[in-house]
Amino acid sequence: MSRNQKLLPRQAAEKIANELMAIKATELVAIMCDEDSPPEMIAALQAAMRDIGAEYAILLQPSRAAANKNMMTPVIEHGLERADVLIGLTKSSGAPVYAAKVKELLAARRLRVMSLAMRDLDTLTTGGATADYDSVKESGDALAEIWRNSREMHITSEAGTDIKAPIAFDDVIVECGYVHEAGYMAGLPDGEVSSRPVEGAANGVFVVDGPAAIIGKPDSPIRIRVEMGKVVGVEGDCPQADELREILSTVPNADNIAEFGIGLNPASRPDGIFQEVKKRRGQVHIAVGDNLYYGGTVQSNVHIDLVLLDPTVYLDDRLVVDGGRVKT
C-alpha cells in the first residue's frame, strides 16, 4: 500500500490476526485495553477473533499517569498466565510491552505479543500500518546480522547528537510485524531493530527533535547529556523538557539509557506520533527507563522513546544510517 492509503479498523484487525500473528482457533487470546483505548479497534479485534473462532477476553485496566506507565494490574497478570496471545491496545500505558510479567512470559516462551500500545486509531490504520511487512522483515534481518557482529554504536546528527556506547550484541531484537511464535513481540505499525547499550556505558549527548513517548513532540529541541549510562542533564526551555526533567527526577531508574533503535518502515509518516515516526526508515530513537524487555536488569515504571531525526549511525566502523538514509 502507498503512504496515502488507509485501512478500515476491521482490515487492520484482520491483518494483525491472520497475517502478522496467524492466530488459530485453538488459542486463548487476551486483548488488553485501558479507558482511553480506541473503541473502534476493540470492536474490530473482537470481530476478527470471532471469525477465527478463537476464545478471547477483553482485559480492561485503568489509564495510567506518567509515573506508572508500565504498571499492569495483578488481575491481568494472573490472566496472562493462561493466554497464548496478548494484543496490547492500551492508549495511556506501555504495560503490554514493558511490564515485568510480560517479559517473564516471553522469556519462558509461553506468550507472544502484538503491541498496539500508546497508538491512536489513525496510527493503526494509515502510514506504517499499511506497509509490506515481508519487505520490512527482510530489511530488519539484514541490519540485525550486522548489529550482532558489532560491538559499539555511535550516533550523531546535525542537531548536535554525539553519543557512543558498547551494545548488547547478543540481545538484538527484530520487530518487523510478524510474531508467529511464543517468546516474541511485534507491533503495528512496526519496523525496527534495537538493543540495549551495555548498562552504565553510554556517554555523550543526544538531541531530541522528533516526537517522544509521554511528553509528545517538543516545541524546540531538547539536549540530553549522558554519563556512564545515566542522564545527567536535560537542557531545553519548552514545556516538554520540563515534563521530562520532572519524570527523570521523580521516577526511579527513569534516567537509565535503556535502548538504541533504528526504524526501517518506508511507509511510516514523518509527521505522526512517536510510535509512527520511530518506525520510519532511517530514524533513530533512544529510550530511557526500563530495559528488561531488552535483556537488561534495570526495572522502571517508565520506558520513554525519544526520536532523533535524520541521524548518522555507525556500528563499529560500518556506516549503517547516513543522515536518515539506511545504507544496508
Image (spheres, helix red, strand yellow):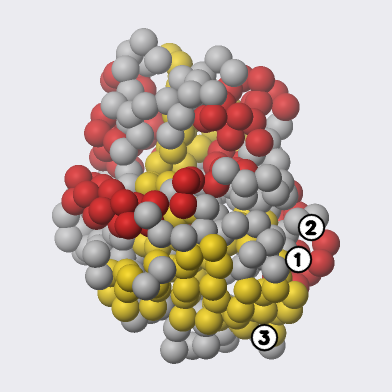
Residue at 59 percent across and 18 percent down: it is 81
Q: CA distance from mark 3 to mark 1?
A: 14 Å
Labelled disc at residue 236 = 3
Q: Is residue 8 above or below residue 77?
A: below
Labelled disc at residue 248 = 1
Q: CA distance from mark 3 to mark 2?
A: 20 Å
Residue type at mark 3 is: Gly
Residues at marks 3 and 2 touching, judged by CB atoms closer than 8 Å: no
215 or 204: nearer the viewer: 204
Residue at 53 percent across and 81 percent down: it is 162
Q: Residues within 10 Å of mark 3 (few under 14, many from 20)?
A: some
Residue type at mark 2 is: Val
Disc 2: which residue:
251
Q: Is residue 303 above or below residue 50?
A: below
Q: Residues within 10 Å of mark 2 (few under 14, many from 20)?
A: some
Q: Horizontal and vertical percent for residue 275?
A: 45, 58
Secondary structure under the numbered disc 1 in the rendered image: helix
Extreme residue in the left direction: 1
Which numbered disc flags the more N-terminal residue, 3 or 2? 3
Residue 40 seen in the figure:
no
Q: Quadrant of the C terminus?
A: bottom left
Residues at marks 1 and 2 touching, judged by CB atoms closer than 8 Å: yes
Q: Is residue 277 above or below residue 90?
A: below
Q: Quadrant of the N terminus?
A: bottom left
Residue type at mark 1 is: Leu
